[in-house]
Image: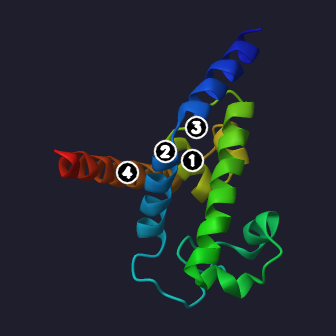
């Protein structure tokens, strides 16, 4: 019963999260993953603004993997992956915060759900969360 209630509450929170929150999180992930816009494959074959691995890319699109270096295509796949992670967190009773999404982006959803994300992934998630806070502060300052 408790898990069901948490799932409902987190589901409500996830629905309330705006597209702006998603954009901010994805922008921060991009800045951490590939701040120099490199088109060269990473150590494990990662490509593009979000440093997708081939298997993750293929979960969300049938587009060729080399298009991970094409920003508009990569953005679409990033949104799909973000939403997939968010649904997975909610389904498992975890809040779909920028921190949890970033940690799952880096360590994998299963590691986060099982509480087994390594320290490096927690550090990564903290960096992303700090950048999200900076983006929000800049947006707020520009409105004033």
For the residue labelled by badge 4, is the local secondary structure a helix, a strand or a loop?
helix
The percent coordinates of residue 66 (x first, y second) are 70, 87
Residue wearing tag 2:
98
Near mark 4 (Cα within 10 A), the count class, few <14, some 14-19 or many ≥20, is: many
Seen at 58% across and 76% down, the residue is 72
In the current view of this chain or complex, which residue is farthest to the left? 144
Q: Distance between the residues labelled 2 and 1?
A: 5 Å
Q: Distance between the residues labelled 2 and 4?
A: 8 Å
Secondary structure category for the residue under label 1 = helix
> Splitting the image into 4 quarters, where does residue 115 fall?
top right
Query: Alpha-carbon distance for marks 4 and 3?
Result: 14 Å
Kindly check if marks 2 and 4 are in contact, taking CB atoms under 8 A apart as contact: yes
Q: Say if mark 1 contacts mark 3, CB within 8 Å.
A: yes
Residue located 55% across and 42% down the image? 100
Q: Earlier in the sequence, mark 2 or mark 4?
A: 2
- Picture layout, residue 22 above or below residue 76: above
Does the CB distance between marks 4 and 1 fall below 8 Å? Answer: no
């Amino acid at each position: 019963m408790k898990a069901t209630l948490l799932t409902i509450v987190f589901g409500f929170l996830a629905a309330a999260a705006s597209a702006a929150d998603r954009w901010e999180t994805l922008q921060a992930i991009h800045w951490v993953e590939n701040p120099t816009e490199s088109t060269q494959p990473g150590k494990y074959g990662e490509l593009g603004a979000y440093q997708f691995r081939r298997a993750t890319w293929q979960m969300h699109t049938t587009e060729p993997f080399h298009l991970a270096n094409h920003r508009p295509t990569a953005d679409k796949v990033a949104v799909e992956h973000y939403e997939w992670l968010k649904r997975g967190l909610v389904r498992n009773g975890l809040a779909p915060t920028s921190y949890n999404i970033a940690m799952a982006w880096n360590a994998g959803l299963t590691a986060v759900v099982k509480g087994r994300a390594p320290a490096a992934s927690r550090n990564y998630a903290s960096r992303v969360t700090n950048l999200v806070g900076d983006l929000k502060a800049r947006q707020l300052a520009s409105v004033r």
